[in-house]
Amino acid sequence: MADARAEVNPPADEDEETLTARHRKEKKELQAKIQSLKKAKVDKKKKKELQDEIVQLEAALEARHADELNRLQALKISSTEEGEKEEEQSAAPEVNGEGDDEEDSKPVKMSKAQRRREKKSQEDKERQAQIKAEEAANRGSSPRVLEDRKIAELLAARGLASFPVAADGDCLYNAVKHQLQTRLAVYEYETADLREMAADYIEDNKESIIFYMTNPDTGDILGEDEFRKYCHQVRNTKSWGGEIEVKALSSGLKCPIEIIQASGTSPVHGEGEDPARKLVLTYHRHMYRLGEHYNSTVDAVVASGKDAEEDGGEDDG
């Protein structure tokens, strides 16, 4: 299967607002396509294949959107640095030894083509630096390698394998969404719906959970304004979800949620719920430099089958 992240090359001049609008449009288009696929009359075997295809389509779109957002942020950084360089060049006096002619003393400005070339060069350098950093992180016995190895062992013992989720702040919610779709064939929840559910639970159960909610800078329990801000961020931003949000989702969905992690025990939130509805996620402390991350899981047989299909596709050219 082709990587959907490579299917669209966003315009170089696309700003964040335009990119976000396009992402919303593409999500709506994908949902329309999914609804059309669901209406098709198919047998039980085909229905399972159709569900797998839908999950892959959504995961691919989310991963591509995350890649495009990361690329845009990298371009912003590059543009800022380039602008600073231009200001320095403009401010520096030009020494040419040819007298005080005003025209001769003006600094030479870079053309648009030159700026584009420099921006592309800077982007290539940043990409190469990131690749080298990732390669270094994957060598030897780095914390990430050790963690990945341990989690893979724990999953293998259960007949499971990790399913990667984009690291875009929505990883917990998207991992839960993937579990709902693949484990329970529940397709009614979008990421925004799950965030809304978590925020509602936190607001409704403030008295029982507020003592676990502290200011990261002071360690003090959140005040009223801080609590409202916290709930707003859960509901309306890409704020990272943690243990409180896992508990909230488990309660709202009435599903036990087990978190597989490399160290310590693997906690199960919502143990009183129906065990047949259990969702299984993995928790990674060292996967990304930005911080903690959640992935979803799939049956190991399914994961092996997908790997074989991809290898076969590559051999076929």
Image (cartoon, rainbow, N blue to C red):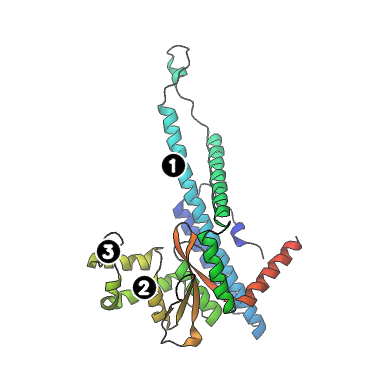
Q: Which residue is mark 2?
A: 244
Is residue 165 shown to the viewer in this render?
A: no
Instruction: Residue 108 in the image: state x and y as whole percent.
Output: 49, 26
Amino acid, disc 1: Thr
Is the C-beta separation of discs 2 and 3 under 8 Å? Answer: no
According to the picture, the residue beneath numbered tag 3 turns out to be 219
Q: Residues within 10 Å of mark 1 (few under 14, many from 20)?
A: few
Whole-percent x and y of residue 37?
61, 75
The N terminus lies in quadrant: bottom right
Task: Inspect the image, locate mark 3, and give the three-letter code of the amino acid beneath it.
Answer: Gly
Residue for badge 1: 80
To which quarter of the image does residue 265 belong? Answer: bottom left
**Residue occupying image coordinates x 36% and y 67%:** 234
Camera-nearest label, 2 or 1: 2
Whole-angstrom CA distance, mark 2 to mark 3, is 16 Å
Observer-side mark, 2 or 3, equals 3
Q: Which of the marked residues, 2 or 3, is nearer the chain's N terminus?
A: 3
Q: Going by the picture, which residue comes out furthest to the top?
A: 99
Q: Is residue 172 left or right of residue 133?
A: left
* Residue at image location 59% in from the left, 59% down from the top: 5
Numbered disc 3: secondary structure: loop
Q: At numbered mark 2, what does the secondary structure look like: helix, strand or loop?
A: helix
Q: Nearer the viewer, residue 291 or 302?
A: 291
